[in-house]
Image (cartoon, coloured by chain):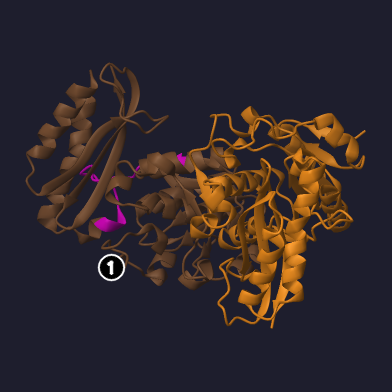
Chain colours: A orange, B brown
């Protein structure tokens, strides 16, 4: 039986004898992508802690907080027996209803996902900081799927001197190339097919990656051919700054894309070598 | 010989065998007020760590960052031999020059000291969060002199689940009643005499503390009688919210005052029972 702990006090008590700790923060709705993080965590420490918490602080007005999938029993059933699950209530993590103290991402939190989702990254960093203070892991494992999140968490850990190692696991994909996401379940068959344009665009960009302009033109061609894809952005960013690379830049970049398919917002990214 | 450590890596290594840790963050220019914090810390844990770091992030444009007193040798000489001093350079704590990730105080950080010093409390919380992550103390000791700082640090620790106990030590005063401050050294004899109006006003308010209005009127009378005191604010706040109490409030409050004497900004506070 997988152990499920709901309070901070019980978790801290349980972890006193846990040895080294690897931590996987999630919002539940677990899929193979999450399970890859858990498998990686098991390689890295004596005890694996998985948190399952849909963080209201990182959802904006009119976003899908209410309809975000929640099924704790089904999530727990997917996890290995020896994982410690931390599944606090909103009142346990935000006894005051919200948090007036925030960990803020600054300007880099207002671009890309942050432009579409004001306050999202401040809410994300705040709950990650809280969870790191509660779990006190040796290593925390994130998925590369959320590239901007990974960038901002790494920067927070560095800038706030958080005593933890950040480990990042490659995005898990369907055979079709579609990146796994808890939100994929909202897609009907036609939308699912249309959504393949995201990974398709990134792959096409990589295949023609001589310059930023060429790579983006190739990506746009794939995305424009799919009318069901409502593109938000596609860009090549410097992995060190998450700023768009210059036109004459040569070297490693992260190609990022976000689009709405129907009412479902999807994101994807891949590494890409320019020049 | 008091041990002085300048790098994060060396400090972490040193503290691996430190037992329980009590931490006193300071900006140096140590006086008896700081030494009272250090004495308290020594009662609370096996090892006392004192940081000496003038944090540029909590000084605004036109403030006294450049002239803020710095004399590490003199500070170290004042401390007990068994204290571990952490005295990092600015480059050690802010290798990127500044921090894009911030811990922010929200609305409560924009009132009183925050109104006069925009960004001050975000800079303070950010460096305190960093230092707590570096030192990982069991208890951190602050002086009640900086009442709003104490309020915001306590709230940060609670809201971000920082695993530390906050201990607060009463303000140390001269015989005259003037609260000790590193900035008192800027006062000439006349200004020093004028500065007594701050503690005098708080004491007079406490003596006539039937209602907020009566207490504030009594305080203003003392402050107004001293033309060298350029008052910024005097107020009675609820210790739980740091918001001004209502006119019909009865119970414990914190009476706070800030004023400029010459070019020197001074603050003071005291507990006061209304009704």
Taking A247 as reference, is B47 above or below it? above
Q: Is residue A15 magenta?
A: no
Residue at point 51%, 55% (across, down) = A110
In the image, residue B170 lies at what x, y percent? 38, 40
Residue A22 visible in the snapshot:
no
Q: B87 or B260: nearer the eye?
A: B260
Helix, strand or loop for the magenta stretch, by majority: loop
In the image, residue A193 lies at what x, y percent? 80, 50
Q: In terms of secondary structure, where does tag 1 sit?
A: loop
Occupied quadrant, residue A150: bottom right
In the image, residue B243 lies at what x, y percent? 34, 31
Q: Is residue B171 magenta?
A: yes
Residue at point 75%, 32% (across, down) = A70
Residue at point 79%, 40% (across, down) = A188
Total labels drawn: 1
In the image, residue B234 lies at what x, y percent? 22, 36
Q: B229 or B108: nearer the eye?
A: B108
Left or right relative to A59: residue B249: left
Q: Which residues are magenta?
A: B167-183
Q: Tell me which chain the residue with mark 1 is part of.
A: B
Q: A210 or B61: nearer the eye?
A: A210
Q: Residues within 10 Å of mark 1 (few under 14, many from 20)?
A: few
Residue B250 visible in the snapshot:
yes
Q: A215 or B17: nearer the eye?
A: A215
Left or right relative to A77: residue B245: left
Taking A8 as reference, is B141 above or below it? below
In the picture of the structure, the residue carrying the numbered disc 1 is B67
The quadrant in which the C terminus of chain B is found is top left
């Amino acid at each position: 039986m997988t152990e499920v702990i709901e309070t901070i006090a019980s978790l801290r008590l349980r972890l006193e004898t846990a040895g080294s700790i690897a931590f996987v923060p999630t919002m539940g709705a677990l899929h193979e992508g999450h399970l890859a993080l858990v498998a990686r965590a098991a390689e890295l420490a004596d005890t694996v802690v998985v948190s399952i918490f849909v963080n209201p602080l990182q959802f904006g007005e009119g976003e899908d907080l209410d309809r975000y999938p929640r099924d704790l029993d089904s999530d727990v059933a997917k996890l290995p027996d020896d994982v410690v699950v931390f599944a606090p209530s909103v009142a346990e993590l935000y006894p005051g209803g919200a948090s007036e103290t925030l960990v803020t991402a600054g300007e880099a939190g207002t671009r890309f996902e942050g432009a579409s989702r004001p306050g999202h990254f401040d809410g994300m960093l705040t709950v990650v900081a809280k969870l790191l203070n509660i779990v006190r892991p040796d290593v925390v494992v994130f998925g590369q799927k959320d590239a901007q999140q990974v960038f901002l968490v790494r920067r927070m850990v560095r800038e706030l001197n958080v005593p933890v190692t950040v480990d990042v696991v490659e995005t898990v994909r369907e055979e079709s190339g579609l990146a796994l996401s808890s939100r994929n379940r909202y897609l009907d068959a036609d939308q699912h097919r249309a959504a393949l344009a995201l990974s398709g665009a990134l792959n096409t960009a990589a295949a023609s990656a001589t310059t930023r302009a060429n790579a983006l033109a190739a990506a746009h061609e794939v995305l424009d051919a799919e009318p069901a894809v409502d593109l938000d952005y596609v860009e090549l960013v410097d992995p060190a700054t998450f700023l768009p690379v210059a036109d004459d830049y040569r070297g490693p970049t992260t190609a990022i894309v976000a689009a709405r398919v129907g009412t479902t917002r999807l994101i994807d990214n891949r590494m890409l070598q320019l020049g």
